[in-house]
Amino acid sequence: MNFIVIIFVLFLISLSYGHSLAFSSTFIFVSVVMTSTIFTHFNLKDVELLRAWIPDLIEEEKPFSIEARIHNTTGKKKYDLKISKGKTHSKDSLHLEGGQSAEIKLNLAGLPRGRYRMKSLSLRTTFPFGIFYSWSYGEVEKEFIVHPKVIVGNDLRKFMMGETHEESEIMVKGDNDFEGHSKYQEGEPINRINWKVFGRTRQLLKKEFVSPIEREVIVTKKMIEHLELEEGLSLLAGIIFQADQMGWRFGIDWEGHLISPDRGRDHLVRCLHYLGAINKEVVQI
Amino acid sequence: MKFTNRDNLLYFPMVLYLLSMAPFLGQHNTTTLAISGIGVLLSLILNHKNIQLPMLFRYGFVAFSTIAVFRSFGSLKGLEAGTGLLSILAVIKLFEMKKPRDFFIFVLIVELLLVGHLLSADSLAVLVYVVFLSVILFYFLSVFNKKNEFHLDKERVKITLKVFLYSVPLAAILFFAFPRLYLGNLFTSNVKDKGLMGFSEKLRPGDMAELATSEEDIFRAKVNGRPLSQFDMYWRGAVLTRTDGFNWVPGYIKARHFYKFFEDKEKFSYEVDMDKLENSPLFLLEGSTKVRVLSRGKVNRLTGHSYKVSPYNNQKIRYEAKVVETGFIPLAEKEKKVYLQLPRGLSPRVRDLARMLGDGKTFEEKIQSIKNLFYQKGFEYTLAPGKYEGEKPLEEFLFVRKKGFCEHYSSAAAILFRAMGIHTRVLAGFQGGEYNPIGNYYLIQGRDAHAWVELFNPEKGWVRVDPTSWIAPDRIRLGSNAFFNGISRPENISEEDFIAGLNNSFLKKLKFTVDMYYYELNRNFLGYDYDAQKDFFKKLGFEYRRPFYLFLFCLLLCAVVTIIVIVYQGRKLDNRPEFEKNWDLFLATLKKKNVEIESYMGPDTIYKQTKLQISCGPEVSRVFELYISLKYGDNYNETKARQFDAAVQEATQSIGQQV
């Protein structure tokens, strides 16, 4: 736009002065600008978007990065190539030799929870002078889910499967992993004997702990009934996230749809995606 | 060279700014230069100390500068005020040179500034400099286009030059074919008297010494017709009619014809291109008529068949005229008085001398008596006679020192002639000129500045008398070049041969050639106006009645050139790697064998399709495998590419043999 204004001003000066130097300087400027647009166009021509990678875990309202691999199908070097989505452009730019491919990263702003389809990405260049830009679209055609915001810091014991509130209270009193007592057998480590109980009852009893691998939590709609949906889902995402961090098994039971408790990253992604997609239609971006 | 420190970004624009200002310092006034200088220093210090100026200060600086420029020029309109303001705006942009976008804006301002300088200079040489600087500016635009780091690499130099080179045809078409419309003075102001050539329309004996010793070019004159002798070349500038007894000024006489011009008896015509941009008299040869000013400007007709032009739109003055036979027109009564005017206080000693020299003599005898006076009474020609500052300078010259040059002799002779009763006027202008045999024109320089007198002969009209030719005949006969360089003519060589010989050396020829190109380019380029454009297209066989048709023609040409550039660039882009071309050939072979291949299919799909439709040996699979690796693998590998080419050949043969 700036250049268009300057060209207009130069034209006015030329027509006002009406002599060769004013015209020639204007025409040189116009020609250079016009020629540079041709260069800009051809710098992007025959550059292809081969693939794009969208992260599987994208949290609501948190910036995320996608990566794309672009390929120069020509034998000529291409300069200052970028990818963009909407008004967001990749921070870095790429130069590609003839026949070369390379990856480029695009940082995107956070999105609201939901299901999205990214149809395409723009390839873009302002080469050589940054006066104009040329763009083309590369097909991505990928769906992705933005999971709810993760609110961590909840006491997971409150949501443990099969435990009553009372039991939870008892557990809080001692060691977090304490489950009960059993009879002490000879040869077992002496430090597991509960000496306080021995003092009271004169019985050698050892403390029993619950193994983390046996703990599990299943989040349900019931848990968040008293909350607004988005806040509740964030809470559930936090529980799942924490459970995953602590090595617990976790699952979802949402209005009869059950994701059985399990562990691992894929399972975490599945659960968070499930929460992200609740009551959401696919939105194209 | 690679830079990652953004602070370095300032230094390049600063150098570019200095390059865009340095050759044109003379075009700016003290206010502009002072503000710009302070700005540059300030931005250097701020950048060094890494201090960001508050926005308020920057706006304050803009406001202060605008007011200062307005006060200095009395307006913000016009070229001088405009370039002044732009130079300050560019400096202010230096303050905030932190991002490539700032540089982008800076380039736009500097481009406008350069156009301002170009218009002020009105010279083709400056256009070349401006284009050169624009190439550098655009190169840096290209460098800073990459936002995170910038390299000063050769590749981008090549690309920038390529863009400029490719834009030449388009610029040329626009230059020649875009209608030379004229909207009037939107941005323009008249040229102020700058006194660049040092020519004064007043004559104060001694003042011309500086000009007469300078080798600065004043104007070039192309004569169509016979070559001129030194005696033909009296370039009349100012006609001076009023004297105080030593100095002369134009005086006032109602402009009218002083000669009868016989238009049908044309001797020759000539065109003059002034070298300096300023208000100036037109320097015309005797007998000039049909004077036409070719550049834009206001023409004032002055006394004694002389003109003065105030150029518009910063155009150097160009004009043409014809020299024809003239007849005389008797003097009007009022004029007679004017041409005999002498100061009341003219020294009795001078009056006595005039009486002694002229009493009882004819017109011709009176001239001869003054010639004898200068010739025989110990008068001397010198450009350094010292100043005549006494109360009676004329007496001092005639009776005491007897030293001077054209101004002194012309003034003294004119006063003596008037005292003898001859109607006299003094002419200031140029005499002679160096002939450029290669370009067939005359170059008139400062040292050709001259003054002489014209006397009214009641029988013949105005006749020229040059007192300098009596005291320093070689100055007139051989020209100022030989005379001031102390080159004397051997007696056995004629004047013409002697002058021709002076121009025969290699260096002189080289100088003439360079000057000829400079002149012709300037003349044809700067003189390409609406009429010249019309003539140009007429010669090409394209006559148009309205500029609109030319505009359409221009658009058409531009479209054609743009398409040629696009096709040329596109053709070059077909230069894909060999393996891509071979892949296309391979696919063509498959299609011949009726394998259904669609444009959206990737290599994997095509492979599956091929396997379904023809029998695929390992050589075919190898082609697909290598292609995927080459195209989608991390590194392009020349060896692999060669293997691919071989595999394609093998597979094509194998497929071709299938029935």
Image (spheres, helix red, strand yellow):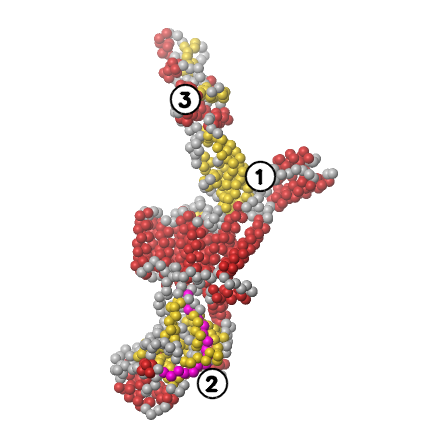
Residue occupying the point 43% across, 83% down: B327
| Residue B597 on the magenta segment | no
Chain of the residue where label 1 is placed in the rendered structure: B
Secondary structure of the residue carrying numbered label 2: loop
Chain of the residue where label 3 is placed in the rendered structure: A
Name which residue type carries label 1.
Answer: Tyr
Looking at the picture, does residue B409 appear above or below residue B38? Answer: below
Picture coordinates of residue B76, whole percent (x, y): 34, 58
Picture coordinates of residue A223, whole percent (x, y): 41, 20
Question: Quadrant location of residue B591?
Answer: top right
Query: Hey, which residue is sitting farthest front in the picture?
Result: B545
Do the residues marked 2 and 1 share a common chain?
Answer: yes
Disc 2 from disc 1: Cα separation: 91 Å
Q: Which SS does the magenta portion mostly show?
A: strand
Looking at the picture, does residue A238 appear above or below residue B617? Answer: above
| For residue B165, side relative to residue B329 (left or right) | right
The stretch in magenta equals B314-331
Give the residue number, with chain letter if any, for mark 1. B632
Name which residue type carries label 2.
Answer: Glu
Residue B339 has which mark? Answer: none
Give the residue number, with chain letter if any, for mark 2. B491
